[in-house]
Image (tube, coloured by chain):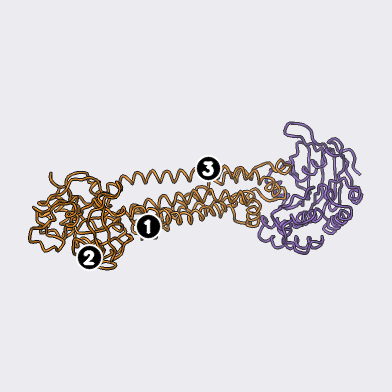
C-alpha cells in the first residue's frame, strides 16, 4: 500500500521527501536543543575567537563532502557519457572475436588488431530487406594522432545528422572532420599508417577537408572520416568496386573487390528488426552485437566499482566524521572554561549543551555546503579533463543522490555531535573555572 | 535574601578538609566582607555559598532554601535566579562586546525576562560610566573597565544576592573606591545581600560585617 503510494509520486516529490526525511532527525534535534535559547551571539563569538580552528574543521568537512560528491557524480556522468556516445551505433557486425574489443574499436575508436569482415557478409547486409543503413568502419590510419576512419557518406550523415560546415566527402581525395579536430574545410592532410606512434610513416595520399561534423559527444568528434575506398586504395588493396566504377564513393560494394572491414555499422529499418538481424548474423563466421548491451555489461561491472566508490565515499565521510567528533571533543575542552563560566553564572546545562552543539553544527553545515559547491566545481573540472582526454562528452552534474548523501552525512554527524555536547555540559564547573 | 550557615564543613574529593564555618548569619540587604590570608579558604566559602562547591556537612541556607540538599542542576537554577557573581579576574567572554557580556543572562533566560535583563545591563553599564561604544569587544577595555563590565553582568538579572571575589584586586585606588561605592550603593538600593572576599581594607571597612578565615577555619565574625 505504502509502496504503491510512494512509487505513484512524481520523482521530484520522492527525492524531496527523502531529503526531508534525512534532515528530519537533525531539524528535530535542533528544535529540541535550541528552543528557548539565543545561542547566536556566543556561537558567532566563538567562531571569531577560534577562526583558524573553525576554518580547519570546515575545510576538512568541505574536502570530504566535495570529493565524495564529485566521485559519485563523475561515475554517473561517465556512465551517461559512454552510453550517449554509443547512441548512434544500433548494431555492430564484425568477424568473430571479443565483443568488447569490437565495441571499443567501432564506437570508441580504440582499434586493435581484429579480423576483417569479408565482402560476402557485407553484401548480405547491404541487400538485406530489414537493413536501412550499413557502413564499413575501417580504422588503422591517423593524422597527428587523430584516427582516420574509412566509411561511407551515408554514415557521416547518420552520425552527424547534418554537417556543421561544408559537405560530406564525395571522392577518394576528400575528408570530413569531427567537431574537435583542428582542421577546417580547405585544409589538407596526409594520413600516416597506424596511430603515428612508430614515427612518421605517411601515405602518399592527400585529403582535402570538405566538411566538419556537428558535435556528437563521442570520440568521433576527434576523428577524420574518409571514404573506405581511399583507405583500401592507399593500402594497395582492391577499392570495393568493379572495373566500370565511376569513382563515386559509397556502397554498394562488389563482394569480390571488397578488401574487408574490421566492423560494420548496421541500422535496421524497424527497431524490432535489429534483434532479428543480431540473431541472423551471430554465426560461426560473424558476430553481431548491440553496443548498448555490451555497454550494459560493462556498466554492470562498473556498477560493482560504483558500489566500491560509494563505500569509499561513505567511508571517507565516516572517517572525517570521526575526526570531526574527536576534534569537537578537544574543542569542548578548549571551550571548557567559557562553558563553566556560563554554568557558574546560572546558565542551565541545556544551554551549554545547545551552544556546543550549535557551534559544531555551524562548522559541519558550513563545511557541507562549501563541500557541495566544491563538488560542483570538481565535477566540471574532472568532466572537462575526461572529455578532453577521451572525446566522450562527460557532463557530471550534482543530482539528488549526492544531495541525499550529504544530507545523511550532516544528519548523522549532527546526531553524533550530541555526545561531545553532552560531555561538555557535564564537566565539573569549578575545575574548569579554576583551570 | 538572608543567609544562615550552620556547622558547615567542606572537604576535597580526597577527604581533605578545606573549610569549617561553625555559624554565620547575615540578614537580607546586609554586606559581609570575608578576609584572611591567601589560601585560607575565603574563595572556597564564596564558592560554597554560590553552590559551585558541594557542602560536605552542615547547612547553607539562603532564605528558606537549603543548598546542601540540591542537585547540581537545582543549584545552577538557584544561581541563575538569585545570585550575581563577580570573579577576581573578570572572566568575561573576550569575543563578545561589553553590552553582550553584561547582558549574557538574556541568552538563556525566559523570553519574557530578556528585554528587562538587556535594559538593566545597559543601564548598569551606563551608571558605571561605560555608556559609550559598548558594542566594542571587551578586549579593548582596561582592567578597571572590564571589572565594571563584570559587575554589570552580575547585576543585570537584578539578583537578590551579590557574591564578589576580590573585585578591586586589579584596580587602582581611585577606580577601586568608585567601584566599592557603586557596589554598596547598588546593594543598598535593591536591599541586596552582598558577600565579598577581599584584602582591600577600604572595602572591608565599608561592609556591615567581617568574617575572618584562617587556615580553613572561620575564626572571627564582627
Query: Which residue: 34% across, 44% down?
Result: A304
Mark 1 or mark 3, whichever is nearer to me: 1
Q: Nearer the viewer, residue B203 or A175?
A: A175
Say if residue A20 shows up in the picture. Answer: no
Q: Which mark is residue A322?
A: 3
Residue B58 lies, in percent from the top left, at 78, 38
Q: Report whether A44 appears left or right of B174.
A: left
Q: Are marks 3 and 2 on the same chain?
A: yes
Of all chains in the rendering, the one displayed in orange is A
Horizontal relation, residue A277 to residue B27: left or right:
left
Residue A318 visible here: yes
**Which class describes the residues within 10 Å of circle 1: few (<14), some (14-19), or many (20+)?**
many
Q: Earlier in the sequence, mark 1 or mark 2?
A: 2
As helix, strand or loop, the secondary structure at mark 3 comes to helix
Residue at the location (66% across, 47% down)?
A335
Cα–Cα gap, marks 3 and 2 = 61 Å
Residue tagged 1: A395
Q: Is residue A284 left or right of residue A392?
A: left
Amino acid at each position: 500500500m505504502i509502496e504503491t503510494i510512494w512509487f505513484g509520486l512524481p520523482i521530484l516529490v520522492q527525492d524531496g521527501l527523502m531529503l526531508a526525511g534525512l534532515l528530519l532527525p537533525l531539524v528535530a534535534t535542533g528544535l529540541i536543543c535550541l528552543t528557548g535559547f539565543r545561542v547566536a551571539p556566543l556561537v558567532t563569538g566563538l567562531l571569531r575567537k577560534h577562526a583558524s580552528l573553525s576554518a580547519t574543521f570546515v575545510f576538512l568537512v568541505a574536502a570530504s563532502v566535495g570529493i565524495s560528491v564529485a566521485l559519485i557524480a563523475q561515475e554517473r556522468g561517465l556512465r551517461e557519457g559512454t552510453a550517449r556516445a554509443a547512441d548512434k551505433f544500433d548494431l555492430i557486425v564484425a568477424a568473430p572475436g571479443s565483443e568488447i574489443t569490437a565495441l571499443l574499436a567501432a564506437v570508441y575508436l580504440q582499434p586493435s588488431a581484429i579480423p576483417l569482415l569479408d565482402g560476402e557478409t557485407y553484401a548480405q547486409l547491404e541487400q538485406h530487406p530489414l537493413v536501412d543503413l550499413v557502413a564499413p568502419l575501417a580504422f588503422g590510419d591517423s593524422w597527428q594522432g587523430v584516427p582516420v576512419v574509412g566509411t561511407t557518406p551515408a554514415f557521416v550523415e547518420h552520425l552527424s545528422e547534418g554537417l556543421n560546415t561544408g559537405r560530406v566527402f564525395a571522392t577518394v581525395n576528400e575528408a570530413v572532420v569531427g567537431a574537435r579536430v583542428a582542421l577546417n574545410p580547405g585544409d589538407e592532410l596526409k594520413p600516416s599508417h597506424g596511430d603515428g606512434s612508430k614515427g612518421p610513416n605517411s601515405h602518399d595520399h592527400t585529403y582535402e577537408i570538405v566538411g566538419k561534423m556537428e558535435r556528437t559527444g563521442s570520440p568521433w568528434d576527434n576523428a577524420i572520416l574518409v571514404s573506405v575506398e581511399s583507405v583500401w586504395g592507399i593500402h594497395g588493396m582492391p577499392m570495393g568496386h568493379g572495373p566500370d566504377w565511376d569513382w563515386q564513393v559509397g556502397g554498394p560494394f562488389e563482394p569480390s573487390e571488397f578488401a574487408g572491414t574490421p566492423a560494420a555499422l548496421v541500422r535496421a529499418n524497424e527497431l524490432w528488426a535489429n534483434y532479428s538481424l543480431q540473431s541472423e548474423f551471430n554465426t560461426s563466421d560473424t558476430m553481431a552485437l548491440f553496443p548498448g548491451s555490451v555497454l550494459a555489461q560493462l556498466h554492470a561491472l562498473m556498477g560493482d566499482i560504483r558500489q566500491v566508490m560509494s563505500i569509499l565515499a561513505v567511508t571517507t565521510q565516516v572517517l572525517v566524521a570521526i575526526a570531526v567528533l574527536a576534534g569537537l571533543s578537544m574543542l569542548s575542552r578548549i571551550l571548557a572554561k567559557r562553558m563553566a563560566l556560563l554554568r557558574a553564572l546560572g546558565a542551565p546545562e541545556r544551554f551549554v549543551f545547545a551552544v556546543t552543539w550549535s557551534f559544531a553544527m555551524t562548522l559541519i553545515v558550513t563545511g557541507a555546503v562549501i563541500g557541495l559547491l566544491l563538488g560542483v566545481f570538481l565535477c566540471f573540472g574532472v568532466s572537462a579533463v575526461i572529455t578532453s582526454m577521451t572525446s566522450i562528452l562527460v557532463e557530471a552534474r550534482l543530482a539528488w543522490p549526492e544531495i541525499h548523501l550529504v544530507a545523511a552525512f550532516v544528519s548523522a554527524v549532527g546526531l553524533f555531535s550530541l555526545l561531545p555536547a553532552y560531555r561538555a555540559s557535564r564537566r565539573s564547573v569549578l575545575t574548569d573555572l579554576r583551570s | 535574601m538572608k543567609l544562615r550557615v550552620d556547622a558547615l564543613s567542606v572537604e576535597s574529593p580526597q577527604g581533605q578538609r578545606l573549610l569549617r564555618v561553625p555559624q554565620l548569619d547575615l540578614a537580607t540587604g546586609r554586606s559581609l566582607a570575608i578576609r584572611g590570608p591567601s589560601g585560607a579558604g575565603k574563595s572556597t566559602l564564596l564558592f560554597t555559598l554560590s553552590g559551585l562547591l558541594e557542602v560536605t556537612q552542615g547547612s547553607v541556607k539562603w532564605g528558606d532554601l537549603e543548598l546542601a540538599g540540591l542537585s547540581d542542576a537545582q543549584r545552577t537554577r538557584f544561581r541563575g535566579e538569585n545570585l550575581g557573581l563577580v570573579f577576581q579576574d573578570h572572566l568575561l567572554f573576550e569575543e563578545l562586546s561589553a553590552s553582550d557580556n553584561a547582558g549574557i543572562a538574556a541568552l538563556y533566560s525566559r523570553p519574557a525576562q530578556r528585554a528587562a535583563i538587556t535594559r538593566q545591563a545597559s543601564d548598569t553599564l551606563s551608571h558605571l560610566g561605560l555608556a559609550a561604544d559598548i558594542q566594542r569587544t571587551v578586549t579593548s577595555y582596561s582592567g578597571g573597565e572590564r571589572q565594571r563590565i563584570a559587575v554589570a553582568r552580575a547585576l543585570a538579572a537584578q539578583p537578590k544576592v551579590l557574591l564578589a571575589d576580590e573585585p578591586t584586586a586589579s584596580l587602582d585606588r581611585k577606580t577601586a573606591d568608585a567601584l566599592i561605592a557603586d557596589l554598596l550603593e547598588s546593594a543598598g538600593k535593591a536591599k541586596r545581600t552582598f558577600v565579598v572576599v577581599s584584602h582591600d581594607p577600604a572595602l572591608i571597612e565599608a561592609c556591615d560585617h567581617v568574617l575572618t578565615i584562617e587556615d580553613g577555619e572561620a575564626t572571627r565574625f564582627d
